[in-house]
Amino acid sequence: MDPETKIGWAGGYVGVGLTSANLAGRTLRDLVLSKPSALTQLPWVNRSVRAWEREPLRWMAVRGLYTALKATDRAEANGKAYAPHLAWLGAWIKS
């Protein structure tokens, strides 16, 4: 929250987004109104966050991992006891 412009943002909700968005909205309200409260004292208020992985690279890696693992499963289901190149690719993407 920028106290001069009164512009703030919230995001990064995972799992329980509705509850988190409600809490973030009430927290931003208090910050915009310069109203000290228990919400404005929470540890994540005005905290610097790390940069996320760049898209679409993260998405491509995840999709590649799933594709390699599914292909390995199909190869094994078709009687191939071992698919080394697919297993290697899945392990490499996962690491």
Image (spheres, rainbow, N blue to C red):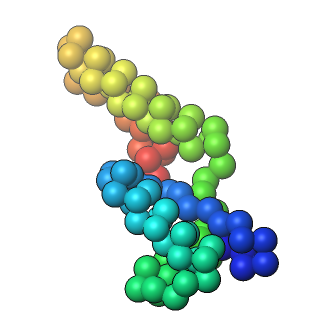
Q: How many marks?
A: 0
Q: Is residue 47 visible?
A: no
Give the x, y percent position of residue 24.
47, 65
Give the x, y percent position of residue 30.
53, 76
- Looking at the image, residue 14 sits to the left or right of residue 6; the answer is left
- Front one among 48 and 68: 48
Dividing the image into 4 quarters, which one contains the N terminus?
Answer: bottom right
Q: In the picture shown, does residue 32 fall above or below 86?
A: below
Q: In the picture shown, does residue 50 fall above or below 14?
A: below
Residue at horizontal 35 percent and vertical 30 percent from the top: 69
Seen as rendered, the residue at the extreme right is 4
Q: Is residue 61 visible?
A: yes
Picture quadrant where residue 57 is located: top right
- Front one among 50 and 25: 25
- Front one among 16 and 83: 16
Seen as rendered, the residue at the extreme top is 78
Residue at horizontal 59 percent and vertical 71 percent from the top: 49
Give the x, y percent position of residue 26.
46, 68
Give the x, y percent position of residue 85.
44, 30
Residue at horizontal 43 percent and vertical 80 percent from the top: 39
